[in-house]
Image (cartoon, rainbow, N blue to C red):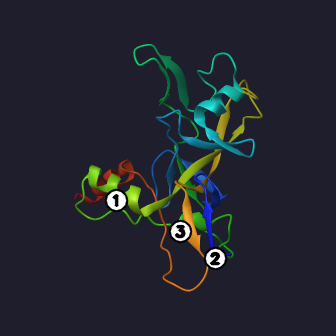
Amino acid sequence: VERTILPKGTPICGYAREGTWQKEASGDKCVGYLFDDVDTAVFFEKRLMSLLECAAMVEEGDMGSCIAGHDVFFDNEEGEVQVQAMGGYAQGRYYVPVPPSGPVGVANMGMFANDIAFEEGCSGSEYALASEERSVLELAWRMELEEEGDMAGKRVRPTWPVVILSRDVAFNNGPGEPMEVGVHYGWKYWEQVMQRSGS
């Protein structure tokens, strides 16, 4: 096969199956757990779906607290379902991967992907345009049902991030220039980096 096209949402590799949850960001490979859009892609029951579809599968009635650390609600003003983070999430909102002690493989190579869209001094809109052009990877949380406590079977929680394609991508097999692929970190990540560095 000389050329193949993989569709948007195709899983490429794991980010890191082993990690710890922290209340503060730590290192350059941590991933924040924070939803602000019900259309965000997540994995649940071995399938990629929107966060809203995941919530509906978990709780057919009141979806309010079925996503750990978040409130899902109907906004009467906007006329749509929305999601927002709730304060005081006990587990911590930052997943910090454990550096691999053995060989890097399909389960953990995602943590080494870089965001090739960011350039020093760029604005948020410039970054968004560059990311749309250059970044073909994004992260999706793998969710699972809680098995203990009052919310057992009624709420999903995150386990680890998975790297997926953010759009349809054509891969060529054969001689030619290698293809550099980047992962979308998001402007909020870069804002925090710039704040810490004082730039």
Question: Which amino acid type is shown beneath numbered disc 2?
Answer: Glu
Mark 2 or 3, which is nearer the eye? 2
Label 2 crowd (10 A; few <14 / some 14-19 / many >=20): few
Q: Tag on residue 112?
A: 3
Query: Which badge, 2 or 3, is on the more N-terminal residue?
Result: 2
> Residue pushed farthest front?
2
Q: Tag on residue 2?
A: 2
Query: Which badge, 1 or 2, is on the more N-terminal residue?
Result: 2
Tell whether label 3 touches label 2 (CB within 8 Å): no
Indicate the quadrant where residue 2 lies. bottom right
Question: Which amino acid type is shown beneath numbered disc 1?
Answer: Ala
For the N terminus, the quadrant is bottom right
Q: Tag on residue 179?
A: none
Looking at this view, is 41 or 101 the one in front? 41
Image spot of residue 28 (x, y percent): 45, 62
Give SS at disc 2: loop
Residue at the image position 67 percent from the left and 58 percent from the top: 17
Image spot of residue 166 (x, y percent): 52, 54
Q: Mark 1 points at which residue?
A: 130
Q: Marks 2 and 3, how far apart in space?
A: 27 Å
Question: Is 125 placed left or right of 85 in the picture?
Answer: left
Asked if 46 appears above or below 86 in the picture, the reply is below
Residue at the image position 63 percent from the left and 62 percent from the top: 12
Looking at this view, is 94 or 169 the one in front? 169
Question: Which amino acid type is shown beneath numbered disc 3?
Answer: Phe
